[in-house]
């Protein structure tokens, strides 16, 4: 995609990774103050996991979700730009 | 390795040129360095500070508690932390309106760590000129050694930074112990490396690009600015027309302004802009250019202040207002919220009661013909001392409360579960389901009391 190229790849990476990182912090803060990860693991699963590991995995999952959302926004913004450019040359 | 590390710079944001801020002294620089040392000092030393036999500031993840000196916050108190963050954001608004981007120049972690990494770079690679020469020079044994040394020092400092970060979540003694015995857990290691790497990248390489491209505050700070906000500005009427001249020459005699066009103000600027072009969003108000120009003015025997802290109004010779509607509004909101938070914290009752009705049966009939409901009570003692409590229930005439353990004791900072039964005469039940209230009162502290509501279910009137 031409427009994708006009924004450097690093710039794209940062504009996806960075806001999602910040939002993941907020999301994990709210989520984990309401839920204790120990209560979230089903009883029948015999998982022994340290609290730090549980919170870390939770945070990384939130980050992943936010990355998907940020990436979607970036993707549509750029491809819409391209469409508009094609319709109004 | 040194070569590789240099690569991202060229490819980051388009047309990026590496900036080599020139070293400089002066009053504002001294103030800034003081701020850097104090803030970094707080960050690195704080985990070592003990309070009441535990770490003074600690997010205790396994226990789900946040220790802040004498205060212990539970997940239920999340709202306080959120309020604190909102307060921090609001004070940023207030101070930005009043004194501009001082946050950026003096206190932002990005600035503070960048200054620290720049300082290391200067100690190892030398002054601005030698740094530029070194980067231009082809790779040689000496260059490789200098770069290797710089990155080793940077990485060591980054790892220490990452270690300190994790020490806010795992007690530093335990963490230090794990480190020296090489038994750090995988996630501890991960976060040390993650935070260390982020610091290394942001303070070593990204630097002003973080301010320019990644910082949301830099983008919207202009919304808080007005003509009375303190800014760093050049005095064009006095400086122009700029031009070089020998020392001791009176500017008027050669038809020039006071600016000798030495470019020192540009060379010292960590964001690489020219303050003489006017207020720009890249300017982090670090005041390095003020110190730089003052030094030049002193050398030329011209009065200081060609580049200075001023406001748009006073630069244009208009009246300056410190108190103005915007400031009043921000201040009122800030003070109100502060007051609310403080009174709330002061009135916070470190006791919580949760009542859960037994889900297996709606009710049962006792031998003496009473209707009985069973509840599980969770008592959360968030205080630093253990307490004994008394439990009462109200809501139905002549109800009886039975506890499986009449002597209720809960240790400091823990949860106790007990089973309570309420028995009532069917004749006193006005409805199929009525409200009952549990009153929990600490026997040794009057202010520790809570009420919790629950439903009592009976057969209902036929
Ligand atoms: S223009 Fe001056 S105050 Fe602004 S960032 Fe550059 S050196 Fe600092
Ligand atoms: S440091 Fe002062 S004199 Fe030198 S170029 Fe900048 S404004 Fe002019």
Image (cartoon, rainbow, N blue to C red):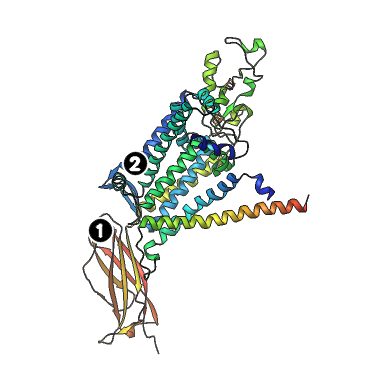
Q: Extreme bottom residue here?
A: B462
Q: Give the mark nearer the N terminus: 2 vs 1.
A: 2
Horizontal side, residue B461 vs residue B315: left or right: left
Q: Extreme left residue here?
A: B407
To which chain does the residue with label 1 belong? Answer: B
Crowding at dot 2, Cα within 10 Å, few <14 / some 14-19 / many 20+, comes out as some
In terms of depth relative to the viewer, which is nearer, B141 or B7? B141
Quadrant where the C terminus of chain B is found in the figure: bottom left
Give how far across and how far down residue A3 sits, in percent: 68, 48
Identify the residue at image location x=41%, y=39%.
B158
Horizontal side, residue B68 vs residue B407: left or right: right
Return the residue at label 1.
Answer: B445
To which chain does the residue with label 2 belong? Answer: B
In terms of depth relative to the viewer, which is nearer, B167 or B290? B167
Q: Quadrant of ligand 1?
A: top right
Quarter holding residue B317 = top right
Q: Is residue B322 above or below residue A7?
A: above
Identify the residue at image location x=24%, y=64%.
B389
In terms of depth relative to the viewer, which is nearer, B158 or B319? B158
Give how far across and how far down residue B152 sits, in percent: 42, 35
Q: Is residue B127 above or below residue B197?
A: above
Same chain letter for marks 2 and 1? yes
Horizontal side, residue B66 vs residue B261: left or right: left
As drawn, the label of residue B208 is none
**Does the numbered disc 2 mark a residue whose Cβ is under 8 Å from ligand 1?**
no
Crowding at dot 1, Cα within 10 Å, few <14 / some 14-19 / many 20+, comes out as few
Residue B445 visible in the current orientation: yes
What kind of element bears circle 2? helix
What kind of element bears circle 1? loop
As drawn, the label of residue B46 is 2
**Proximity of marks 2 and 1: CB atoms separated by less than 8 Å:** no
Which mark's residue is nearer the viewer, 2 or 1? Answer: 2
């Amino acid at each position: 995609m031409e427009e994708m190229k006009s924004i450097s790849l690093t710039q794209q990476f940062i504009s996806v990774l960075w806001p999602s990182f910040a939002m993941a912090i907020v999301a994990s803060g709210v989520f984990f103050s309401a839920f204790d990860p120990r209560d979230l693991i089903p009883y029948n699963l015999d998982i022994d996991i340290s609290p730090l590991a549980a919170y870390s995995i939770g945070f990384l999952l939130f980050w992943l979700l936010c990355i998907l959302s940020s990436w979607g926004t970036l993707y549509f913004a750029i491809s819409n730009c391209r469409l508009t450019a094609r319709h109004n040359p | 390795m040194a070569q590789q590390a240099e690569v991202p710079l060229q490819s980051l944001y388009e047309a990026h040129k590496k900036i080599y801020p020139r070293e400089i002294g002066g009053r504002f620089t001294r103030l800034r360095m003081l701020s850097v040392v104090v803030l970094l000092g707080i960050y690195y030393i704080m985990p070592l500070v003990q309070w009441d036999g535990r770490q003074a500031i600690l997010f205790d993840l396994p226990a789900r508690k946040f220790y802040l000196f004498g205060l212990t916050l539970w997940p239920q108190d999340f709202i306080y932390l959120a309020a604190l963050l909102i307060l921090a954001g609001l004070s940023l608004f207030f101070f930005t309106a009043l004194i501009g981007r001082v946050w950026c120049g003096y206190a932002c972690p990005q600035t503070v760590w960048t200054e620290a990494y720049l300082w290391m770079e200067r100690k190892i690679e030398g002054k601005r000129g030698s740094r530029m020469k070194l980067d231009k020079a082809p790779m040689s044994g000496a260059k490789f050694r200098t770069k290797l040394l710089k990155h080793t020092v940077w990485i060591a400092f980054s790892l220490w930074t990452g270690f300190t970060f994790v020490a806010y979540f795992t007690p530093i003694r335990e963490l230090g112990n794990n480190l020296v015995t090489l038994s750090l857990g995988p996630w501890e290691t991960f976060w040390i490396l993650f935070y260390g790497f982020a610091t290394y990248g942001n303070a070593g390489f990204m630097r002003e690009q973080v301010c320019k491209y990644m910082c949301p505050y830099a983008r919207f700070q202009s919304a808080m600015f007005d003509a009375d906000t303190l800014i760093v500005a050049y005095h064009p009427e006095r400086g122009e027309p700029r031009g070089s001249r020998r020392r001791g020459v009176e500017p008027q005699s050669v038809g020039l302004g006071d600016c000798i066009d030495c470019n020192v103000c540009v060379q010292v600027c960590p964001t690489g802009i020219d303050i003489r072009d006017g207020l720009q969003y890249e300017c982090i108000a670090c005041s390095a250019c003020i110190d730089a120009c003052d030094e030049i003015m002193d050398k030329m025997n011209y009065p200081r202040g060609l580049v200075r802290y001023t406001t748009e109004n006073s630069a244009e010779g208009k009246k300056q207002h410190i108190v103005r509607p915007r400031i009043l509004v921000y201040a009122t909101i800030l003070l109100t919220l502060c007051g609310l938070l403080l009174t709330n914290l002061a009135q916070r009752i470190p006791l919580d009661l949760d009542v859960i009705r037994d889900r297996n049966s709606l009710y049962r009939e006792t031998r003496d013909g009473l209707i009985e409901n069973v509840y599980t009570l969770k008592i959360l003692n968030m205080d630093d001392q253990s307490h004994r409590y008394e439990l009462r229930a109200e809501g139905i005439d002549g109800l009886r409360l039975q506890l499986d353990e009449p002597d209720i004791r809960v240790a400091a900072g823990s949860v106790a579960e007990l089973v309570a039964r309420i028995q009532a005469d069917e004749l006193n039940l006005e409805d199929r389901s009525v409200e009952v209230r549990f009153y929990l009162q600490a026997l040794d502290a009057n202010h520790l009391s809570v009420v919790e509501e629950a439903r009592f279910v009976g057969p209902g009137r036929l």
